[in-house]
Image: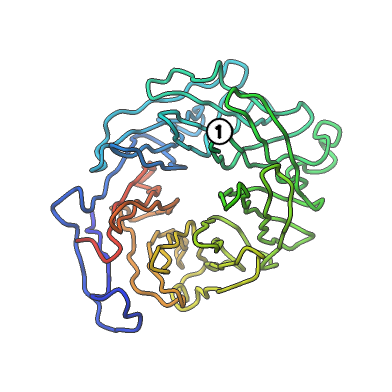
Amino acid sequence: MRTVFLYSLAILGIFYASCEEVRKLGPNPEEVFVKYYGGGYDQSAVDLEIEENGFVILGNTRLNSLSETPEPILIWTDKGGNELTSRKLASPLAVDFVLSSALRVKDDNYFIAGTAYKGDDRDVWVSVQNREGNPTLANDFIFGTDDYLEEAADVLILEDNSFLILGSTTNIDENKWKGVVDANDSTDILLLKVNSQGNLLWRKRLGYGGKDVGVKIEKMENGNFAILGNSKIGTDFEIFIALLNPDGNVYNTRNLKPGRQNKALGLDYKNGLLSLSGSADGVAYLESLDQSLNTQSEFSANSIFSTEISSEINSVISTEEGTLLITATWSKENREKDASVLLLGANGKKIWQDPLFFGSEEDDQSVMALPLDQDKYLLLGNFKFGSNTMMGLLKISEIGLK
């Protein structure tokens, strides 16, 4: 396994210094660590939450081959990233299988959202349970209609333990049009609000008649929230941002970066600014908007990713100091993927960049990052070893791996 390196400046505020210090993993696992989870054919991490005594990872697992039905899995670790226990989540009897996509933890309850598959049908699936796997609602819930294909992408828990589910739905009768058009090319952004008893309160759809897909949802002030998505209009793919009030009514929208290879991936809100990330025209994209959706800054990826064929920013965290910690994935000439974490100054200048080599000589992919106390961060990724894929978790410091 290759040693993980992180390059940092000796003083965080000096953005233009040329002298870089190489820092290695320290001996104290409470400071920094690299851990791997899963074994077998295909292990895919999708989300990460922080608990009082450690961390919990949500993923999907297949132990043997692609022909095997995937299963959602929860993995609990201590604060040092050491695995304590794991549990696969059984699919409801009425469906073939489910794929998980989002996890939130509140009051010792685990809110898990995903997509339930049955034949050609797809519906939004929600499970709320405690750590022992006992449902804290009566059953898992399936939200969908027979004539539409619906998928879940993200979930947001509100103060009263109701929750919002963001995803997508076909905007035509899939059965009626099957064989005539591809229903997957005609979707709307789907937003559901469900109360703490699992009852659907309201259902909203946003779209322009093309392919519109919800990706991330984030809390703002006064009960408002922002949703990030992708929108295909004609041959162009645009990044879509919308602001909604507590009743789910849209009060502002904006489409950004029209082009052929655009994809929204990450959303963060802090101090009145929305930070959006993804890829635009095949290269890493990062933009900050105010609450009126006016651009405050836009980061050009060419200075960092100029030698790569394609790149994307998977997640972004706005720090209290005004810097931006991002995770990224890019492809090189041999088409293999590498993952990286970068710290950027408020002006978009790179402070340090670390290639996230988790021992893999093949495809690595960053998934997301979360802030910890005392300027520490957790990075979640997926890493290929031969024919197998594993989940990986890295804990770093904002000024280096001490």
Residue 290 in the figure: left or right of residue 40? right
Q: Residue placed at 47% from the left, 76% from the top?
A: 306
Name the image quarter holding the C terminus: bottom left
The colour scheme used to paint the residues is: rainbow
Q: Residue placed at 26% from the left, 76% from the top?
A: 11
Q: Identify the amino acid type marked 1.
A: Asp
> Can residue 333 be seen in the rendering of this structure?
yes
Residue 335 in the figure: left or right of residue 204? left
Q: Is residue 400 above or below residue 67?
A: below
Q: Which residue is mark 1?
A: 160
Q: Secondary structure at mark 1?
A: loop
Q: Residue placed at 53% from the left, 26% from the top?
A: 127
Q: Position of residue 335 (x, y in %)?
A: 47, 61
Q: Position of residue 168 (x, y in %)?
A: 68, 42
Question: Which of the two residues, 14 or 140, is positioned nearer the viewer here?
Answer: 14
Q: Assess disc 1: are there few (<14), some (14-19) or many (≥20) residues with their C-alpha within 10 Å of its C-alpha.
A: few
Q: Among all residues in the image, which is located at the extreme front? A: 222
Q: Position of residue 197 (x, y in %)?
A: 59, 22
Q: Residue placed at 77% from the left, 50% from the top?
A: 207
Residue 87 picture quarter: top left
Q: Is residue 317 above or below residue 302?
A: above
Question: Which of the two residues, 321 or 69, is positioned nearer the viewer here?
Answer: 321
> Can residue 64 be seen in the rendering of this structure?
no
Q: Is residue 98 above or below residue 296?
A: above
Q: Position of residue 328 (x, y in %)?
A: 45, 61
Q: Is residue 302 above or below residue 334?
A: below
